[in-house]
Image: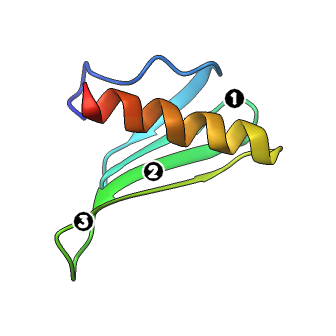
């Protein structure tokens, strides 16, 4: 993700940290990260949210964004 390109999440974003990939912190205390693997040719995504369906929604939003 570049500075101005982020997916349109259903949850308000509090801040973005690009120290190790792109980690998005949401106002509801959840987060999502997208980063390249250091050992494989993979783009890894992870997410923690208050509810499992919210995490699944974030991962799907990222997937659709990357696939364009």
Residue 42 in the figure: left or right of residue 33? left
Q: Label 3, on which residue? A: 42
Q: Label 1, on which residue? A: 27
Q: Secondary structure at mark 3?
A: loop
Question: Where is residue 7 shown, x and y percent of the image?
Answer: 40, 23
Please state which of the two labelled residues, at mark 2 or mark 3, is closer to the viewer: 3
Q: Quadrant of the N terminus?
A: top left
Label of residue 68 in the image: none
Contact between marks 1 and 2 (CB within 8 A): the answer is no
Identify the residue at horizontal 27%, vertical 33% (top origin): 67
* Mark before the other along the chain sequence, 2 or 3: 2
- 3, above or below 48, in the image: above
Residue 17 in the figure: left or right of residue 59? left
Label of residue 33 in the image: 2
Q: Secondary structure at mark 2?
A: strand
- 1, above or below 17, in the image: above
Q: Quadrant of the C terminus?
A: top left
- Cα distance between the residues tagged 2 and 3: 13 Å
């Amino acid at each position: 993700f570049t500075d101005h390109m982020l997916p349109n999440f259903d949850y308000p974003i509090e801040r973005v940290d690009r120290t190790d990939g792109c980690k998005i912190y949401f106002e509801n205390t959840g987060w999502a990260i997208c980063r390249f693997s250091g050992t494989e040719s993979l783009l890894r995504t992870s997410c923690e949210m208050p509810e499992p369906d919210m995490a699944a929604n974030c991962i799907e939003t990222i997937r659709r964004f990357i696939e364009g």
